[in-house]
Image (cartoon, coloured by chain):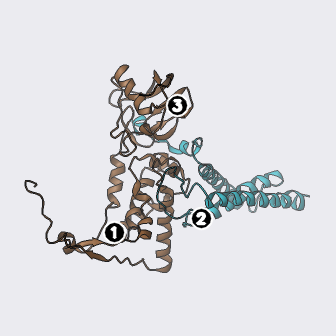
Amino acid sequence: MSVDKEVEVKFKVFRFNPKIDFVPRWQEYNVRVDKSTTILDALLKIKEEQDPTLTIRYSCRQAVCGSCGMMINDKQMLACFTRVLELGSSVVKVAPLKNYRIIKDLVTDFEELFQKERQVKPYVIRHEVEELLNPTGTYKQTEDELLGYIQFADCIECGMCSSACPVSATDPLYLGPMVLNRAYRFISDPRDLGLEQRLEVIDSEHGCWRCHFAASCSAVCPKGVDPAKAIQLLRRMLVKKAVLGTSSSKKVDLIPMGHIKGKLELPKGWQ
Amino acid sequence: MAIYEENREGVSGWFRLRRYSVERTLYLLQRLTGIGIVVFAFTHLLYTSWHPGGWGDVILGVLVVYHTMNGLRLVLTEHGFLIGKPIRAIYPYRKGTLYGSQRYLTMVILALFVIFLLIWSYVALVISGG
């Protein structure tokens, strides 16, 4: 445990239960923190010691699950990834992520976001049904091909980019940086052949052309994903396709693997 | 109340500039100058070839020159130029859209904005006005 001296910090927490309350209110708590205390630790301390009715969502506590994104001093940050004292202010304002429906207090509803994500089919699409059912090997990728998408694959779906986006603020139908980044991650994957299936959603009024490059998504991303870059590269790809009239033909070699033979069988007892 | 439950920022989100990168400020200015130019264009058409004259023309210059120069930056970046290649995200993260060539481009564009605005103002105030 840390032996650093503790400091008292005032937390202003957004409280609102849409089922009961007419308007939201700000509730103040004083919490003693040291240099290792994260915002999430402090909120849990409030919940344990002062007010059990405070509602928060978290899971992994190490910036991997993307559950605890919230507005900390008016900027989208992960509560588990932000230390209280590094903010350098004696009053910490904590509110739910903007542009998402509030479920209660600091918990927001991502249902709409995940519905949009489902529309862009966030998985590798291939046409060889026989190979998929009875795999005989693995698909080959070079280091360069991997570098083409690996940055965008680091997304933890915390939804903070879509919350920071000024276009999402005015257009509820806009797919948003997170979804477009997910789409580009799979479109730029050399193994994926699903560009045509995703075009209708992406290449539309509320798709990638809606972005105006305010780059706030990249500014708030806690994992270095750079969704703004993904969107611009997606547009570059679509413009290239429209101008040249061709789509890049992807070819992936299948490396036969001796141990991957025949039908995939589930272990005994699995249904 | 539904409006609080919805929690959407709306147009006020454009003006939330603090704590974000400079690109957001450029975006806001691009929007505002665009609206300004549309308003001017309508008056210009309604009262044929009307323009404010004098310092009004200089303000018009700010709108038009900024919108054009920043527009050029957006044409480049939005087609994937000067924003860097995809890299491995290794801490401390350096995002291509917020560092390096894109930022240099922004500086060049802002310098060109000042130069062209000075020329515009000279024409508006001295050559046409004088």
Quadrant into which the C terminus of chain A falls: bottom left
User: Is residue A38 among what the camera can see?
Assistant: yes
Residue B102, image quadrant: bottom right
Q: Position of residue A137 (x, y in %)?
A: 24, 72
Residue at mark 2 shares a chain with residue at mark 3: no
- Callout 2: helix, strand or loop? loop
User: Mark 1 — residue?
Assistant: A197
Q: Which mark is residue B82?
A: 2
Of the pair A65 and A241, the residue shown nearer to us: A65
Quadrant into which the N terminus of chain A falls: top left
Residue B108, image quadrant: bottom right
Q: Residues within 10 Å of mark 2 (few under 14, many from 20)?
A: some
User: Mark 3 — residue?
Assistant: A85
Decide which of tag 1 and tag 3 comes sooner along the chain: 3
Chain letter of the cyan region: B
- Viewed as shown, does residue A170 lie left or right of A138? right
Q: Colour of chain A?
A: brown
* Chain on which label 2 sits: B
Q: Amino acid at mark 2?
A: Leu
